[in-house]
Image: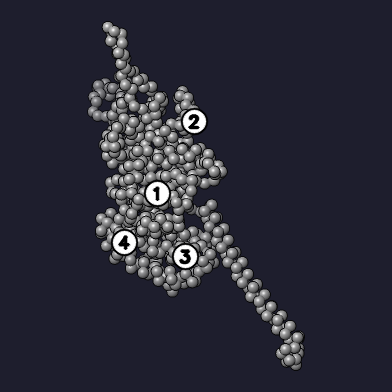
Amino acid sequence: MKQGIESTKNALPPDHPEVLELVEKNARLANEKAALELNYQQLQAKYAALLEQIRLFQHQRFGASSEKFHPDQQDLFNEAEATAEEIPLEEADDALSAPEGASSARKRGRKALPPELPRIEVIHDLPEEQRHCPEGHELKVIGEEVSEQLDIIPAKIQVIRHIRKKYACPCCEAHVKTAAAPEQPIPKSNASPGLLAWIVTSKFLDALPLYRQSGMLQRIGITIARGTLAAWVIRCGELIQPLINLLREQLLLYDIQQMDETTIQVLKETGKKAQSKSYIWVQRGGPPGRQVLLFTYDSSRGQHVADALLADYQGYLQTDGYGGYDPVCANNELIQVGCFAHARRKFDEALKAQGKGRAIKAGKASKGLIYIQKLYRIEKQIKDLEPEERYQERQQQAVPLFDEIRTWLDKSLPQVPPTSLTGKALYYLDNQWDKLICYCKDGRLEIDNNATERTIRPFVIGRNNWLFADTVEGARASGNLYSLIETVKAHDLEPYRYLRHVFKELPRAQSLEEIEQLLPWHVDKEQINNGWAKKVDGV
């Protein structure tokens, strides 16, 4: 039939209507075929992307949550390119596969109880009739066998009675004078500094919601409504605002800062639904010995929040890939530093989403992980060096490795669809390249933003328990209290005893110098941490 058509076309002139109709029909069919092929390719790409997501979700649901990567894992995929361009396994870092700080020979045995704890001796003696040998001779004491048990007594509740003496003239029966009442963290309240410190640390350190604390107090005969506890927490957050202001000043003076943000739900927020998201912005910085961690509430994750928090800051800013920081860095001429932990996580997700038949894509993901693992191995080796020494080691070891990674990345980008998880990991590495390698410019910088993420973790754990903040005032107070507690932890101070000290002394402070003496790096660390072994005054 085709030959018939051809013969008919040859027999007819080119401008014949039938010939023109056949040419037009062929062109239309060719276009439809091209469109179908393109649509098929798009559907195949979508299918592959969805399949990757399903595998990743299955791994997240049923697999191990650890992101640790063993270079030997790439053999599971039997990748075709391993013999041609893969990094030799013997060069990969397998030291990081073990938990940090772990040793091959674990110390065994029970850890001794702290010697500072008070001891109560209980003497166990033989009965009188057993103190003789079979021959009838009296036994003599030749030593002792001592074992210790740890005991605990539930919280001690006491009432502090403030008795203010009153004086008057016995002659004229006038001129009455009364001793001044001590300043209290919450005036006209029956909450002592110790009680407030216990409530705050229970919620913001131990993640105990206020309704549970109210129930715990109820069991020991103290009735305090949850609303009252919430009001006290807000007042405590307002009380420490002068310290938060000083911490922020200290943070902005140092030229290295890390930032991250996480969500919080606020039920009663003007102009927003109760189900909507608000944000806690976390900043970490400060010079050595004066580290500061700040939690700031805002209803938005917008650029204007970053502008406000960094308005008076100059220096390095380390964040993840969130674009909200880019304008403020450009306007304030800040030097952006990326986070290799985020880059690594994307390669890890891509690897977990691959099946055994996805050899090439699995190879790119595993190879990216091996490269990043080598960078972390360098950091592990130099972590205890001085900043200048760390800088030199990075120039000698990390910079040449970056040249190798860049060459591999440029070669790999055209080979992988950008919509796949491996493609997203590669393009993230490419888009963030200048920020990611920036940490090599200064030995004080870190390879990632993990320290800030660890700072956020207690907040996230607490949020899983108390779920939301009721009011904006409560969210702001929570930010202040998390800020002080996490900063205190960074200075190895015991949070409850520090807060008890601050709640007692801050209301009495009359000058800026007196407030500054309450900052974590100015208080007597030994006295704060060992105060439990001494008699703590009741005020």
Q: Residue 325: horizontal and vertical position, in percent? A: 42, 55
Whole-angstrom CA distance, mark 3 to mark 4, is 23 Å
Whole-angstrom CA distance, mark 3 to mark 2, is 50 Å
The reply to whether discs 3 and 2 touch (Cβ–Cβ < 8 Å) is: no
283 and 534: which one is in front?
A: 283
Which residue carries the number 2 mark?
Answer: 227
Which residue carries the number 4 mark?
Answer: 441
The reply to whether discs 4 and 1 touch (Cβ–Cβ < 8 Å) is: no
Q: Earlier in the sequence, mark 3 or mark 2?
A: 2
Residue drawn at x 41%, y 44% as measured from the top left: 295
- Please identify the quarter of the rendering in which residue 489 is found: top left
Q: Residue 526: horizontal and vertical position, in percent? A: 26, 36
Residue drawn at x 27%, y 6% as measured from the top left: 171
Whole-angstrom CA distance, mark 4 to mark 2, is 51 Å
Residue drawn at x 50%, y 69% as measured from the top left: 416
- Determine which of the numbered discs, if any, sits on residue 427 in the image: 3
Depicted 361 relative to depicted 336: above or below: below
